[in-house]
Image: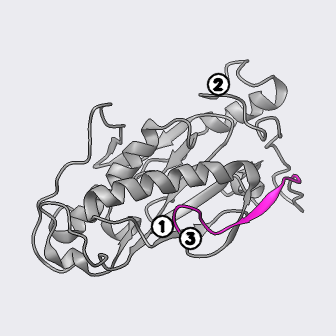
């Protein structure tokens, strides 16, 4: 089931524009204030758009390589580095090596939120990223696949949110396990992103959206149910699937 866009976070933005952060009934931030929290997000619904001036930097990945160099707000850069580290760890647990490339759909774009044109998108501040998936190269010589992973995974392959999120059989199910494990780890880490959107949320069947808006919002669904973080002691499970090629 595809979940509709919800208005509550955007009403929270209106309140934040009128009151100090963390007051007046708006969802408070889950951690220390962030430099962009005080920037108003409300804009005219139509007409020319002037986006706030923020410090943007070119970013092509640090722990992992991005599919293309992109512009991000400088304060988001360390969040992306943390995301890359988590993605590399999960991938190594499941596939025996980190991704060779993070496939993104963009970061900075001076625009409104399509469904709520009275508000700036976090992309308008370089404060968001859309992740479509990951590319993996061949398993390096001398390294072994994790127990239970079919030999076909020694070759290179692609993992995509659109193609693999709902998979339940074969190699595609292993890719689904990777994506869902990654999403759960990120949900558990409130120090990485505040807003996490993905499959099951309107317009996000083909990507994850991560940002640092001035509120907490998690809308990622698995089989119609909200995805939840793993128990604190949980580690990646061994995957046993078919031996088809990925």
- Gap between marks 2 and 1 measured at Cα: 29 Å
Give the structural element (helix, strand or loop) at label 1.
Answer: strand
Residue 24 location (% of width, % of height):
73, 18
| Left or right: 151, with 215 as reference point | left
Tell me how the rendering is colored: one colour
Most extreme residue toward the top, as rendered? 24
In reply to whether residue 61 is colored magenta, the answer given is yes
For residue 28, which numbered disc appears in the image? Answer: 2
- Gap between marks 3 and 1 measured at Cα: 11 Å
Q: Earlier in the sequence, mark 2 or mark 1?
A: 2
| Left or right: 103, with 145 as reference point | right
The rendered magenta stretch, by its main secondary structure, is classed as loop
| Left or right: 181, with 174 as reference point | right
Q: Say which residue appears at 34% left-offset and 60% top-offset.
A: 91
Task: Specify whether residue 106 is in view.
Answer: yes
Q: Which residue is mark 3?
A: 66
Q: Say which residue appears at 28% left-offset and 55% top-offset.
A: 93
Quadrant in the rendering for residue 14: top right
């Amino acid at each position: 089931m595809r979940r509709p866009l919800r208005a509550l976070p955007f009403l929270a933005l209106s309140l934040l524009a009128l009151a100090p952060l963390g007051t007046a009934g708006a969802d408070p931030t889950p951690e220390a204030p962030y430099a962009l929290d005080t920037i108003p997000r409300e804009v005219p619904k139509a007409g020319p758009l002037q986006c706030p001036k923020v410090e943007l930097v070119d970013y092509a990945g640090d722990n992992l390589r991005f599919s293309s160099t992109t512009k991000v707000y400088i304060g988001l850069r360390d969040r992306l580095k943390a995301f890359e580290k988590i993605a590399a760890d999960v991938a190594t647990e499941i596939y025996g090596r980190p991704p060779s490339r993070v496939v993104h759909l963009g970061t900075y774009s001076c625009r409104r939120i399509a469904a709520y044109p009275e508000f700036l998108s976090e992309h308008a501040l370089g404060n968001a990223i859309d992740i479509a998936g990951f590319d993996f190269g061949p398993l390096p010589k001398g390294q072994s696949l994790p127990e239970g992973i079919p030999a076909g995974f020694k070759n290179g392959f692609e993992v995509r949110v659109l193609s693999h999120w709902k998979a339940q059989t074969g190699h595609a199910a292993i890719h689904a396990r990777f994506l869902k494990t990654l999403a759960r780890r990120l949900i558990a880490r409130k120090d990485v992103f505040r807003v996490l959107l993905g499959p099951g949320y309107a317009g996000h069947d083909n990507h994850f959206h991560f940002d640092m808006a001035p509120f907490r919002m998690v809308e990622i669904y698995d089989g119609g149910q909200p995805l939840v973080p793993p128990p604190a002691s949980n580690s990646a499970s061994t995957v046993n699937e078919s031996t088809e090629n990925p």
